[in-house]
Structures are given as structure tokens and as C-alpha cells.
Image (cartoon, helix red, strand yellow):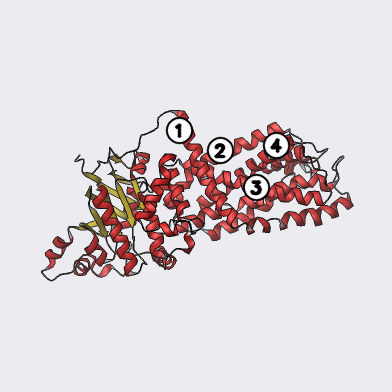
């Protein structure tokens, strides 16, 4: 396999009883690329991320992340990836520094390096002044940046972010984008995000995969996708053409509840 | 740019290194729990209410009645270790609710994508439950002292009690975690937690000896891990108290049950995020 490819899936499939959440997905993401998975609620984005991050075993098909097959070598994959779930994963009862310290220990960052790397991560995310405050006093944008700091502390080669800016105000959202772009250009980290924010997809992502009913319905750069519709087309048009009238049908009660409660916690 | 393979941290291979990693990861999880508890200790104080009621009200009344044969010990001296075991059980049995809470928040997702051993994640939680159990022991010792119970303060006895309380707490907390992994929602968990505690408590030797139980109940009590926790405490905590099975067998039974529960919990824990 091409060593530049850090995420590859072949006919990756996940069923929940009768529902096929992800249906024979084929995907390739290269080093240094910010890849956006778009799609309405229930299109299979989160299920895909959960399989790629080893949280959910695939029903069939396979996936390689950072050089290892996900189902066969989950621990090798875990050492090389970072993940920020859609939910709020930073612990509100701890300070920012303590959250990072826990990550450092779980990822076996040597004691001698811990202090320095945690300090550098806090600086990079602009969190140094708030490092010793409890996370429950943080704003939504600060929490997201802390979670990013936790996810990148062990210098993963692939980062997975599930709806990283949902519920953030425009300034906080921009701050997250800037950190992600810098991570990509400094370290060549591949970043896979899910979003249904078209502006985010357009401004941040190099490549997009639009998911619909468990499959990738369209793949390409934002320009390519827009160009296929017409000269004046926006990503909204692309999205509407693919997802069609099914946007309202998608998204279980649980998805909706989750997204809303995440947004509420971050505000 | 670094390639994916070169960026990989060195992989430990020896068993000793794996064991050390396991211990370090468990301690990291336990440390987090202790920090959080030390910031908000109100929970520990509210947990003192129930043992106080049992010792001060139930214990005093039944000491006067002399309805239950307890050998050389007064009834309250007989039941003090039972109240400690009960307080360990009651605080550990709702431990799983925290796991459901962390799942709803997304904290567990973060732990599970880390390369930490699943067993170490569960062990860390169990360890923190053990430390919580120690605070229960301090509270029950203070209450018992006030009630005039003759406690043993020999270092060996105190250390033994501490170790047994930690093991018992870890056992029931892990059991609770398993229940949480199976039911997955707070509502169902609360219902089941309520249903479990009373039978575990009454089908044990906590407030009456095995010898006066009808045969069927004695059979149930012998299969109840709480009985072995109470029995071990009874031998170590109070002057003149003695255990029926002996502290060694009591600890072995609990350690074996804990090992089984830990293995099961480590397998079920990742299911919380599916």
C-alpha cells in the first residue's frame, strides 16, 4: 500500500440489527490532508469514525489506519490516532492540566517529557492562562481546544474529530480551524472530521466525502464537487442534490438529543 | 513530515513492562477519581448517615432486647463490622452510575481510544472505589467508638481491615460497573441498584449470625460475597470477635470473585460506547 495513505477502508460495513449504518464504504485519506465527511444525521458518519477509531467492530469489510488493520491490531492503531468525540470528553471535575496529564499517562509519554509537552500543548491551544482552572469553568471553545490538545499530545499521525465545532460561536470555531490547519502543516497530521456545516467543509477541508444512507455518494475537493453542479453552485446545492428530500427523515431521536445536549454543554 | 511508522512510540514487549504499564494506567485512573472526590467530599459525609442510623438506633435497641445470640460480644459489637460491610456495599453498588454518566458525557470514549489496557481502566475505577471504602471505614470506626464498641487498634488488625475493606469495595464496585455496562441507562440502573442492595444485605451475616439462619437462607448467604467481607471484618475489627471461615479463606473467596468480575467488566466496558 502507498505509505502516504493513512486511512483506507475496503467495503467497510456496519449493521445494527436490520439497519445498515455503513454500507460497503471505500475511502482513502492521505497524510497531511484534512478530509471532511459530510452528510445528514443518520448518514453513517459517526459509525464510520467509531469503526476507524476501534470503538466499534465492523460487521464486515476492513479498515487500515496508520498502517494497521483496525480489527486485527486495535492497540497499534490506538497508539497512533487521536480522537475528539462529538460529546464533551474533557473531564469537568479536573483542571485542563490534569486532563492532559491523564492523557499523557495513558499514552505512555515518558515522565521526563510530560511537563514540557503538556506545557507546549497548552501554549499551542492558547490555554496556558487557564491551565489550572477546573474545566467546568471553561467556555465551549476552550473545552474543544483542550480536547484537541489531549488528542494531539502523543503526536498521532491521524486525528479524528466528530463535529468539532458544533455549538461554538464563529470566533471559537475559527480558532479551532486555525489550530487544525497548523497541526496539518506542521506535522503532516491527517485529519478526518465529520460535519454538516457547509461553511466548515468549504473553508477547512481539502477533500470531502458526502455520505448518504451509509455510502459515499460523492467524493472530491470542494471545488470539484461544486463544479459538477454549475459555475455558481455552493456546497449547499451539492448537499441538497445528494441528500435530496431525506434530510428530515434522517437522524434518530438519540442523535438529535445528543447533538443538542452537546451544543448546550458547550455554550 | 514523519511517516506513520516512524512516529510510532517504541512498543514494550516483556511481561514485566506490560505489568508495569497496567499498574501505571490503573493508578492514573484512580488518581483522577481521588482528585475529584477530594474537591467535593460532601458525598462522603452524606454516606455517614446510614451507618449512624444502623448503629445508634437499630444497634442500641437490639442490644437491649438480646434477641440475637452473639456469644461473648454485645449485639452492637457483633453488628459493627456488619455495618461497615453494609456501608461499603451501599456506596460501591451505585458506582456504575458514574460510568453511565461518563458515557453520556463522552469521557469513556476518550479513555477507550487510548492504548490503555481495558482491564487497567476498570482496575483503576475499582481501586478508587477501594479508597472511597476506606473513608467509610473511618466513619464507621468513629461511630463505633462513640457507641462504646471495643475496637482493635493493633497495626496488623487495622491494616487487615483496610485491605479487606478495599477488596470488598473493589468487588462490589466492579459488579456495579458490570450492571451499568449491561443496562446502559441511568433510569434502569437506579431501579436495579435498589433491587440488588437489600437482598445482598439481608441474605448475609451482617446483622445476624449464619448459625440462626434457616438452612435455605444460610445456603444463599454462603454464596453471597458480602458474607465473606463481614466474616473477615468480624475477626479483625472488634476485640473478642471471631470469624467463622477464617480471614485467609474469606480473602481468597473475595479475591477470586473480584478477579472474575474484573475480567468480565474489562470485556463489557468497551460495549458502553457502541
The residue mark sitting in front, 1 or 2, is 1
Give the alpha-carbon distance from disc 4 to disc 1, as whole Å.
29 Å
Residue B133: which disc? 3
Q: Residue B108: give x, y in percent of width and height.
A: 45, 51
The chain letter for the residue carrying disc 3 is B
Which SS class for mark 3? helix
From what the image shows, is residue A249 above or below residue B134? below
Residue A4, percent from left and from top: 20, 43
Residue picked out by circle 2? B260
Q: Is A50 on the left-hand or right-hand side of A237?
A: right
**Badge 2 and badge 4 both on one subunit:** yes
The chain carrying label 1 is: B
Lower position in the chain sequence, tag 2 or tag 3 = 3
Residue labelled with disc 1 = B18
Q: Nearer the viewer, mark 2 or mark 3?
A: 3
Calculate the distance from the C-alpha at mark 2 to the C-alpha at mark 4.
22 Å
Amino acid at each position: 500500500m502507498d505509505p502516504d495513505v493513512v486511512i483506507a477502508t475496503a467495503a467497510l460495513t456496519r449493521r445494527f440489527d436490520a439497519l445498515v449504518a455503513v454500507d460497503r464504504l471505500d475511502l482513502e485519506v492521505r497524510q497531511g490532508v484534512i478530509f471532511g465527511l459530510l452528510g445528514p444525521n443518520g448518514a453513517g458518519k459517526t459509525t464510520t469514525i467509531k469503526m476507524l477509531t476501534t470503538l466499534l467492530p465492523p460487521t464486515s469489510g476492513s479498515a487500515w489506519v496508520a498502517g494497521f488493520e483496525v480489527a486485527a491490531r486495535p492497540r497499534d492503531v490506538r497508539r497512533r490516532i487521536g480522537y475528539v468525540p462529538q460529546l464533551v470528553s474533557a473531564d469537568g471535575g479536573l483542571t485542563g492540566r490534569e486532563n492532559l496529564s491523564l492523557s499523557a499517562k495513558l499514552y505512555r509519554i515518558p515522565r521526563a517529557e510530560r511537563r514540557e509537552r503538556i506545557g507546549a500543548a497548552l501554549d499551542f491551544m492558547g490555554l496556558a492562562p487557564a491551565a489550572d482552572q477546573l474545566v467546568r469553568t471553561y467556555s465551549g471553545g476552550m473545552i474543544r481546544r483542550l480536547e484537541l490538545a489531549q488528542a494531539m499530545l502523543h503526536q498521532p499521525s491521524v486525528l479524528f474529530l466528530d463535529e468539532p465545532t458544533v455549538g461554538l460561536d464563529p470566533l471559537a470555531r475559527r480558532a479551532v480551524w486555525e489550530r487544525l490547519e497548523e497541526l496539518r502543516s506542521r506535522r503532516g497530521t491527517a485529519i478526518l472530521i465529520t460535519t454538516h456545516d457547509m461553511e466548515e467543509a468549504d473553508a477547512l477541508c481539502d477533500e470531502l466525502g458526502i455520505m448518504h444512507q451509509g455510502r459515499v455518494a460523492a467524493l472530491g475537493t470542494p471545488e470539484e464537487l461544486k463544479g459538477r453542479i454549475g459555475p455558481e453552485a455552493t456546497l449547499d446545492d451539492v448537499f441538497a442534490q445528494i441528500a435530496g428530500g431525506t434530510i428530515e427523515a434522517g437522524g434518530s431521536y438519540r442523535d438529535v438529543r445528543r447533538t443538542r445536549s452537546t451544543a448546550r454543554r458547550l455554550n | 513530515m514523519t511517516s506513520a511508522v516512524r512516529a510510532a512510540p517504541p512498543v514494550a514487549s516483556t511481561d514485566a513492562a506490560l505489568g508495569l504499564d497496567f499498574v501505571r494506567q490503573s493508578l492514573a485512573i484512580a488518581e483522577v477519581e481521588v482528585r475529584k472526590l477530594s474537591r467535593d467530599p460532601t458525598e462522603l459525609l452524606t454516606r455517614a448517615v446510614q451507618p449512624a442510623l444502623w448503629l445508634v438506633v437499630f444497634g442500641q435497641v437490639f442490644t437491649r432486647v438480646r434477641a440475637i445470640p452473639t456469644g461473648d460480644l454485645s449485639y452492637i459489637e457483633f453488628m459493627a463490622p456488619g455495618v461497615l460491610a453494609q456501608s461499603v456495599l451501599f456506596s460501591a453498588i451505585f458506582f456504575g452510575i458514574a460510568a453511565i454518566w461518563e458515557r453520556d458525557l463522552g469521557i469513556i470514549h476518550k479513555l477507550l481510544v487510548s492504548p490503555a489496557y481495558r482491564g487497567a481502566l476498570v482496575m483503576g475505577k475499582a481501586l478508587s472505589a477501594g479508597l472511597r471504602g476506606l473513608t467509610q471505614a473511618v466513619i464507621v470506626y468513629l461511630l463505633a467508638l462513640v457507641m462504646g464498641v471495643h475496637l482493635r487498634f493493633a497495626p496488623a488488625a487495622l491494616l487487615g481491615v483496610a485491605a479487606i475493606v478495599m477488596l470488598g469495595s473493589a468487588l462490589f464496585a466492579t459488579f456495579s460497573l458490570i450492571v451499568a455496562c449491561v443496562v446502559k441507562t441511568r433510569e434502569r440502573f437506579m431501579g436495579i441498584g435498589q433491587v440488588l442492595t437489600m437482598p445482598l444485605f439481608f441474605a448475609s451475616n451482617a446483622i445476624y449470625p449464619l448459625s440462626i439462619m434457616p438452612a435455605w437462607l444460610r445456603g444463599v448467604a454462603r454464596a453471597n460475597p458480602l458474607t465473606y467481607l463481614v466474616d473477615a471484618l468480624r475477626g479483625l475489627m472488634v476485640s473478642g470477635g471471631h470469624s467463622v471461615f477464617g480471614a485467609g479463606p474469606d480473602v481468597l473467596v473475595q479475591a477470586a470473585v473480584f478477579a472474575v468480575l474484573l475480567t468480565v467488566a474489562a470485556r463489557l466496558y468497551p460495549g458502553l460506547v457502541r
